[in-house]
Each structure stands twice: as structure tokens, then as C-alpha cells.
């Protein structure tokens, strides 16, 4: 133990426990980028950064009514500890919800968790030893990677395109990792309206990827928070709908109801489910009984399918507003066109660095998430995730306009410095700090 | 208690500057310390309702814990003056002088304080004169290593230590993302120290210097706000005569810039014992890992007492 608050000849580092932290805490630290996000909470700032569902679209009387009924009819149970697997009534409803994506399962195989984020952590805890490999889309969900890293997994990205994960790239990456003698434990994927890319894995690829994983004894961790939030047509059925033994499916009420309840679930093969329940009990004893009863009551009495339709309409309008604004203000960028979910993945001219540019964005009162957050290997410098779920269409339009000021300012700055030697680098290097490979075509 | 003891204090924290997060931490710490001292505190994030709130409620004193532009460039302080509400810290004019690092360096240099050779360069200067030409001229005169920083701002945001000529363009770009003027300064090798100054009415007093030794070698944002990443020595491990000289320099910088109530002066003491002025902070960090609270505690002060005494000084108009 190093000395703490008592100044002495050996000084103080202000943390007496610094030398005692587990290795897995490396990376759990304050950062300049994280500090900048604090500004995004101010009303003056148009935040295209966070993935907050638009819960204001949820009629408060529905929630209020559920609260009153739960307290009247089931108060003692709702305020009590529950089981580590979750209440049966809710798990029955979860089967009904999953059936919308083609999944048939037993209520016994559903484990209710504290948001699907906790299910993600529990699965990782069950399977990952330090140094094990997790395969993930590139880019992938930032907080999943935080979980993987906290269990000292090594994340290996697999390329994706507008149709999702590329099967050949998966085969290649598996071969590479195996040739290195490393152990792959699972493939983590968000196949429908992925976070952050917004793209959807085609049905043919879903089948092919399942086959690849089956052949290589790799478990699939299918994370499906957005599948019901489609705009024009439903995504293909869940991967779990055709593969029971090789898939752990994660679902959540955070996007189709509200994240404040913190209720999600895992649907797992029998043997894994038993361990998940025990791990869940070890971590939290039981997921919130109160939230589970509230959601059960909501699902019993409210038109929840209609509410999901309402959310779809709202998010569709916001996606359209963002696409239209991007067309108008930022034609020099390219971006994905999601058919559901919350996010657009934008690609900047090669030499722009979205992370380095963030302070300028904050000055212009707009926030986004830099692309590097979604890679474990430092890639994504010329990408950014733009969320359209929370701001109104008017704010989205204004945010993209501000973003155009930021990007044009940065292009002007780089144009100024394009004559200096580091900017003459000829080797494309997306992950180089400057990120500048040559004068962009629109500057030449 | 006396006639100047504050009964109602508004602590301002947050704002929309790059340092919002740090400011919120500072503000909470100040508010907690004052409350523990028995004072009623309202912690507010400044917004469009602030001025009408202050004119309506007329608190005894405002305690700005706002870092970055909104708190340190003098604007808010000027408005508080206009509406006649006492506030802790430097006046608007003094804050503006200290906030702009190149201006502060010129002023303290005229007072005889050593400060590293430097040049401040606007974005437009590079645009007009050509980046390559400007960088060549710059490195001809200022040898590597250099420190590049935004001309305004704190918490080491946008600051780069350049020890390779090829890294200079990127460092300039990084500084310009925070501010349209960058300060390029010769890196002085030596002991990095921070000297806190407080004045509760009896004149400015230098606190024991805090010596800073970041594990990474650079006192970056991460080194500042992650406990454990930097080792602090209070008082600094300096020869007593040199420590006394550093305290004199810090006090001289504080008075030269016309600062009031509190400040933190950052210095580097070179091998010959000369303290070099880097910058003065009108509203130094007051978080759990900040230097001024560390110095106050090392000097045996109770934070609540000091923050309250500063509020009294503001009410008295000291």
C-alpha cells in the first residue's frame, strides 16, 4: 500500500489503495473525452452522442396506473426480494415478445437481469478467462467492450459492411486467431440495427455465420435491443430462432419501454441458464422485483404493441430528419442508412480525426461519439456515431448544421497545415494520430 | 460569527465550458466544505435563469467554482459587479488578464519574473503566412522540446509536450480545437510546482508549494483527475531558500496580475533554482485531486474555514 492523504517525504498519490487494484481495472479512469461529454447534458448543446430512448413518448398515466395497481394488489411481493431467475409472469410475457422475432423457447430458459447490460456481464463472467478472445463486429457496442476488457478478454474485430458482419471476414479472423493458439470463446453481435453502425445482418448471412460458429465451436452472443424498432420492414428473424444450443440471446425493455426500469433478459441453453441464475444471484440476489411487477402490469394492461409502433414512428421521423440534414449540410461525408434502431455511422474524409475534433464540437454546442470508442484497437478515427433517438427533428437539423461548422473548420485547419511534412505521409493510416494521408480530393 | 459572516452562499459550478466536469467536482467540494462549516449553500449550474435568480434572492455572496471561459474570462464576474452581488475571486479585469496566458506572461515578465520563451500564434497567422514557413521560423528560434497549449483554458486540455519536430503540426491542431490562439512555449526542464495563494483580508499569503510528479511524466488531464496517477510532495522537495524564492515569485505574479482572494501560480524550478512562471489560475481546481486544497490542508487549514473566510472577504469588499 502506498501512502495516501498524509503528505510526507515520500509524497502522496491521493489514493492509498492504488497498488491494490486488480489488473482488470486498467482503463477504468477519467479521460478528457469523457469529461467533454459532461457538456452534452446542457440544454444549449445538441447531443447526438448518447443513445437515450425518447421516454417522453411513453404516456405517464400508463406507468402511473401500473404503479398504483402493483402497489394495491402486489405491494408486499413487489417490494420484496425475488428469485434469481425473475418472476414467472414476466418471463411468460418475454416469450410473447421474443416470438415477434421468431423465437420459440421455454419459460424456464429465460433469466431476467438488471438490463441486458448485466446479462452481458454475467455471460462474460461465465466464459472469459484472461487472454480469451471475443470476436465482435467492427465497430461494436462500446460498453460491451468495456465489459469484455474488464474480464481481460482480447477483443478481435470482424469487418462488416452495409449487410452486417461479413462471413468470409469471420472465417479469416477465426483462422488467424486459432493459428496464434488463442482461444475464442464467443462471437458478440448486434445483428439488427447494430450499435453503432445501424446496419442489419441479412438472413442468409445469419445462417452462414451460425454455421461458421457451429463448425468452430464458437458460441454466439446475440444482443437484440433494437429488433422491434424497425422503420420500413422488420429485420430478419433472430439468429436464436434457428439455433438453440449455440446462441445466447439478450433482450431488454430499455428501448421498447424505458431504461429506468433496468430490466433485460438472457435466453440461454439449459446448462448455461443454470449457471446464469447462480451468477445473477451472486451479483444482485435478484433483479428488481418492483420493476418486474411494474413491467408485467404494463404488459398485461397496456397496448404495448401500439406503444412500440409509436416509438417506431418517432424514431423514423428523426432518422429521416438526420439523413436529410446530412444530405444538405455534410455532403462530403458518407453514412449508413438504418432501417431501425437509434444510430447512423458516419465516415469523415480519411484525414479527419473525430476524437481530436470533439473539443471544437463542444465549442459549437454539438456532441457526437467519436468512432474510436467502438473499436478495441484504436480504429475508427475518421468515423463518428450520430444518435437520432433523443433530440427532436428540429434539434437534429440544428445539430447537423453545427457539426458542419465543426467539420468545415477542421478541414480549414488541416488545409492550413497540409503543407507541413507530416501531412505529406503517403501510407494510408487511419489510426495514425494525425490521420492525414494526403490532401483530400475536395481540398486539392 | 460577525457582520460579514455569510449566511447564504450561491456556489456556481458547471457551465458549458470544456471544463464543466471539473467545475462540477470543484463546486460540489466547495459547497460541501461550506455546509460543514454551517453555511447554507445553494449549488447552481449557471443558465438563463441565473441573473434573475440572483437579483431576486440576493444571496450574501456568490462563490464561483466555474472553470473555463464562463468562469475565468471575467464575463460573469463583470455581470456580478453590475448587479451588485459580492463574489469570491478576482475582478473581471484581472481575471481576463490572467485567463489569457500570453498576456499574463507579458505582464509578469515586465515585473521581472522569468517565464519561458514563447510565441502565441493565431490560426490566421498560419493561414496567412504559410504553416511550413511559420513552423520553420518557430523551431529555428525555439528549440525542441516545446509545450503547445491553447492560449486560454485549463486542466491541460489541448496541451502537448512536443519532443519531436514532426509532432508539432498535430500539437498545433490539437490546441486549436480548444482555442483559436495557441501558445508555443520552450519546455523548461526542472521541478514542476504549484503555489497556491490565499488572501482572506490580511494580504496574500503563499501556501506551501506542491511538487508534481506524474507517473507518465506529463501532468495531463488524466494525470490530474485520476487519483494515483501523480505523486504530490507538499511542501515541495526544494532547498528552503529556493522554496522561499518560488513563493515570492508566485506572490509577485498574483499581485502583478491584480488577482484577488485566491489563485494558483504554476512554476517550474530549473536546475539553477530559478522559478519560471507558466501560468496563473484565477479559479484553480478545487476537486479532491486538485492542488490548492492539497496545499491548504498541508498548511493546516480547514477547507470550510478558508472558503468561508474568502466569502467574508468578498462581502467586506477586500
Image (tube, helix red, strand yellow):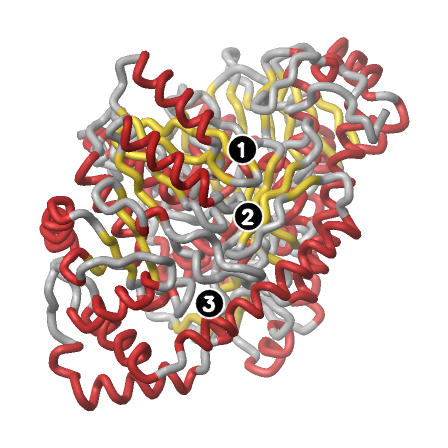
Q: Judge depth for marks 3 and 2 and give the one in front.
A: 2
Q: Position of residue A84 (x, y in %)?
A: 12, 60
Looking at the picture, do discs 3 and 1 lie on one chain? yes
Which residue in the structure is indicated by mark 2?
Answer: B19
Q: Nearer the viewer, residue B274 or A355?
A: A355
Relative side of A60 to B17, left or right: left
Cα–Cα gap, marks 3 and 2 = 17 Å
- The quadrant the N terminus of chain A occupies is top left
- Identify the element where label 1 is drawn: strand
Which residue in the structure is indicated by mark 3?
Answer: B43
Q: Crowding near pointer 3: few (<14 within 10 Å), some, many (20+)?
A: many
Q: Position of residue A134 (x, y in %)?
A: 32, 31
Looking at the picture, do discs 3 and 2 lie on one chain? yes
Q: Identify the disc placed on residue B121.
A: none
Marked residue chain, label 2: B
Marked residue chain, label 3: B
Relative side of A202 to B172, left or right: left
Q: Judge depth for marks 1 and 2 and give the one in front.
A: 2
Upstream in the sequence, badge 3 or badge 1?
3
Which residue in the structure is indicated by mark 1?
Answer: B266
Upstream in the sequence, badge 1 or badge 2?
2
Q: Nearer the viewer, residue B154 or A375?
A: A375
Q: Nearer the viewer, residue B172 or A410?
A: A410
Report if the CB atoms under discs 3 and 2 are less than 8 Å apart. no
Marked residue chain, label 1: B
- Identify the element where label 3 is drawn: strand
Q: Position of residue B238 (x, y in %)?
A: 40, 21
Amino acid at each position: 500500500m502506498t501512502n495516501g492523504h498524509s503528505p510526507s517525504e515520500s509524497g502522496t498519490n491521493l489514493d492509498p489503495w492504488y497498488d491494490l487494484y486488480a489488473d482488470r481495472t486498467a482503463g477504468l479512469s477519467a479521460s478528457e473525452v469523457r469529461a467533454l461529454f459532461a457538456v452534452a447534458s446542457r440544454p444549449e448543446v445538441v447531443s447526438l452522442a448518447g443513445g437515450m430512448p425518447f421516454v417522453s413518448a411513453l404516456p405517464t398515466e400508463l406507468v402511473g396506473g401500473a404503479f398504483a395497481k402493483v402497489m394495491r394488489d402486489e405491494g408486499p411481493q413487489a417490494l420484496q426480494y425475488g428469485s434469481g431467475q425473475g418472476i414467472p409472469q414476466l418471463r411468460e410475457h418475454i416469450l410473447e415478445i421474443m416470438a415477434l422475432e421468431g423465437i420459440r423457447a421455454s419459460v424456464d430458459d429465460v433469466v431476467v437481469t438488471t438490463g441486458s447490460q448485466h446479462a452481458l456481464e454475467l455471460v462474460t463472467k461465465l466464459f472469459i478467462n484472461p487472454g480469451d478472445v471475443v470476436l465482435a463486429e467492427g465497430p461494436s457496442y462500446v460498453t460491451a467492450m468495456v465489459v469484455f476488457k474488464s474480464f481481460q478478454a482480447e477483443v478481435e474485430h470482424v469487418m462488416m459492411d452495409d449487410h452486417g458482419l461479413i462471413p468470409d471476414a469471420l472465417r479469416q479472423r477465426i483462422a488467424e486467431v486459432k493459428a496464434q493458439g488463442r482461444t475464442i470463446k464467443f462471437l458478440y453481435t448486434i445483428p439488427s440495427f447494430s450499435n453503432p453502425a445501424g446496419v442489419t445482418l441479412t438472413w442468409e448471412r445469419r445462417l452462414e455465420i451460425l454455421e461458421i460458429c457451429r463448425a468452430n465451436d464458437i458460441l454466439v452472443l446475440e444482443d437484440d435491443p433494437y429488433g422491434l424498432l424497425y422503420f420500413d420492414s422488420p429485420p430478419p428473424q433472430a439468429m436464436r430462432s434457428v439455433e438453440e444450443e449455440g446462441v445466447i440471446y439478450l433482450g431488454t425493455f430499455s428501448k421498447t419501454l424505458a431504461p429506468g426500469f433496468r430490466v433485460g433478459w438472457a435466453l440461454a441453453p439449459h446448462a448455461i441458464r443454470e449457471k446464469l441464475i447462480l451468477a445473477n444471484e451472486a451479483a444482485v440476489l435478484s433483479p428488481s422485483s418492483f420493476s418486474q411487477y411494474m413491467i408485467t402490469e404494463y404488459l398485461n394492461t397496456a397496448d404495448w404493441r401500439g406503444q412500440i409502433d409509436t416509438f417506431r414512428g418517432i424514431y423514423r421521423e428523426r432518422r429521416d430528419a438526420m439523413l436529410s440534414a446530412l444530405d444538405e449540410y455534410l455532403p462530403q461525408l458518407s453514412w449508413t442508412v438504418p432501417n431501425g434502431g437509434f444510430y447512423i455511422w458516419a465516415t469523415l474524409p480519411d484525414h479527419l480525426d473525430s476524437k481530436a475534433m470533439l473539443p471544437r464540437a463542444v465549442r459549437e454546442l454539438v456532441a457526437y461519439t467519436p468512432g474510436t470508442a467502438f473499436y478495441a484497437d484504436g480504429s475508427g478515427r475518421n468515423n463518428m456515431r450520430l444518435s437520432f433517438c433523443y433530440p427532436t427533428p428540429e434539434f437534429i437539423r440544428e445539430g447537423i448544421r453545427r457539426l458542419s461548422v465543426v467539420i468545415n473548420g477542421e478541414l480549414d485547419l488541416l488545409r492550413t497545415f497540409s503543407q507541413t511534412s507530416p501531412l505529406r505521409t503517403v501510407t494510408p493510416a487511419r489510426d495514425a494520430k494525425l490521420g492525414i494521408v494526403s490532401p483530400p480530393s475536395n481540398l486539392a | 460569527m460577525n457582520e460579514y459572516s455569510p449566511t447564504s452562499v450561491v456556489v456556481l459550478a458547471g457551465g458549458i465550458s470544456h471544463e464543466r466536469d471539473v467545475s462540477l467536482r470543484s463546486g460540489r467540494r466547495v459547497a460541501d466544505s461550506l455546509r460543514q462549516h454551517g453555511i447554507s449553500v445553494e449549488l447552481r449550474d449557471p443558465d438563463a435563469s441565473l441573473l434573475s435568480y440572483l437579483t431576486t434572492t440576493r444571496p450574501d455572496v456568490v462563490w464561483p467554482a466555474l472553470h473555463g471561459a464562463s468562469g475565468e474570462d471575467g464575463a460573469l464576474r463583470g455581470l456580478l459587479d453590475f448587479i451588485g452581488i459580492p463574489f469570491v475571486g478576482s475582478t473581471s479585469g484581472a481575471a481576463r488578464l490572467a485567463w489569457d496566458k500570453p498576456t499574463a506572461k507579458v505582464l509578469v515578465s515586465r515585473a521581472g519574473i522569468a517565464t519561458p520563451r514563447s510565441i502565441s500564434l493565431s490560426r490566421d497567422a498560419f493561414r496567412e503566412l504559410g504553416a511550413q514557413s511559420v513552423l520553420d521560423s518557430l523551431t529555428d528560434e525555439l528549440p525542441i522540446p516545446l509545450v503547445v497549449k491553447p492560449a486560454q483554458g485549463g486542466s491541460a486540455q489541448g496541451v502537448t509536450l512536443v519532443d519531436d519536430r514532426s509532432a508539432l503540426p498535430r500539437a498545433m491542431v490539437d490546441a486549436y480545437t480548444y482555442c483559436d490562439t495557441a501558445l508555443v512555449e520552450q519546455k523548461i526542464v526542472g521541478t514542476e510546482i504549484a503555489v497556491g495563494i490565499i488572501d482572506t483580508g490580511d494580504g496574500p499569503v503563499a501556501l506551501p508549494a506542491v511538487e508534481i510528479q506524474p507517473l507518465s511524466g506529463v501532468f495531463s488531464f488524466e494525470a490530474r483527475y485520476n487519483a494515483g496517477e501523480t505523486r504530490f510532495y507538499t511542501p515541495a522537495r526544494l532547498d528552503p531558500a529556493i522554496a522561499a524564492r518560488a513563493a515570492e515569485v508566485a506572490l509577485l505574479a498574483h499581485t502583478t496580475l491584480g488577482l484577488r482572494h485566491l489563485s494558483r501560480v504554476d512554476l517550474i524550478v530549473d536546475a539553477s533554482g530559478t522559478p519560471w512562471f507558466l501560468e496563473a489560475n484565477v479559479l484553480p481546481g478545487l476537486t479532491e485531486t486538485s492542488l490548492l486544497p492539497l496545499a491548504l490542508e498541508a498548511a493546516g487549514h480547514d477547507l470550510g474555514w478558508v472558503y468561508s473566510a474568502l466569502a467574508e472577504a468578498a462581502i467586506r469588499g477586500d
